[in-house]
Image (tube, rainbow, N blue to C red):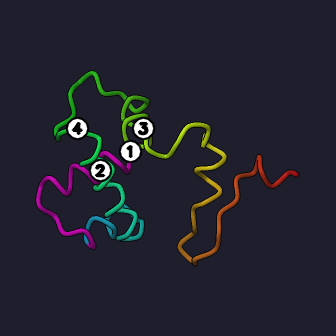
Amino acid sequence: MRHVRDVIRLKSAGMPTREIARRVGTAPSTVRLTIRRFEASGLTWPLPDDVTDAVLEARLFASAGAGSGTRGAIAGRRSRTGRRCIASSSAST
């Protein structure tokens, strides 16, 4: 969640998406997706004090669908080299 907070903070300061991606160490498409999810969540920056990481995660990823849990969220990610990342729990089968 640290990266999510950094992305939102830097974007609200007016920083371009590519620069945010470079600073955070992620792809520009990930930054854009994070910003879209944040905007769709109805939250504003700065976040209220009562918005914990758990609350932030629930608000940003609520649209991912019920039952998609951690395993489903990790399985669809790609590494910087473009390879699919597989959660260790799903790789054991």
Q: Counting residues from the N terminus, which is met first, the one under dot 1 or under dot 4?
A: 1
Q: Residue furthest top?
A: 50
Decide: is 23 above or below 39.
below
Q: Counting residues from the N terminus, which is met first, the one under dot 3 or under dot 1?
A: 1
Q: Position of residue 55 (x, y in %)?
A: 38, 29
Q: Counting residues from the N terminus, which is met first, the one under dot 4 or under dot 3?
A: 4
Q: Is residue 74 left or right of residue 50?
A: right
Task: Identify the element where label 3 is drawn.
Answer: helix
- Please give the name of the residue rendered at 20% of the width and 55% of the height, measured from the top-left corner: 10
Q: Could you tell me the amino acid type at mark 3?
A: Glu
Please rate how many residues cluster around mark 2, counting C-alpha atoms within 10 Å: few if below 14, some from 14 to 19, many from 20.
Answer: some
CB under 8 Å between callouts 1 and 2? yes
Q: Is residue 73 magenta?
A: no
Residue indicated by mark 1? 2
- Please give the name of the residue rendered at 14% of the width and 52% of the height, measured from the top-left corner: 12
For the magenta stretch, what is the residue range? 1-18
Please rate how many residues cluster around mark 1, counting C-alpha atoms within 10 Å: few if below 14, some from 14 to 19, many from 20.
Answer: few
- Cα–Cα gap, marks 1 and 4: 16 Å
Q: Counting residues from the N terminus, which is met first, the one under dot 4 or under dot 2?
A: 2
Residue indicated by mark 3? 57
Of tags 1 and 4, the one toward the viewer is 4
Q: Could you tell me the amino acid type at mark 2?
A: Asp
Decide: is 32 above or below 70.
below
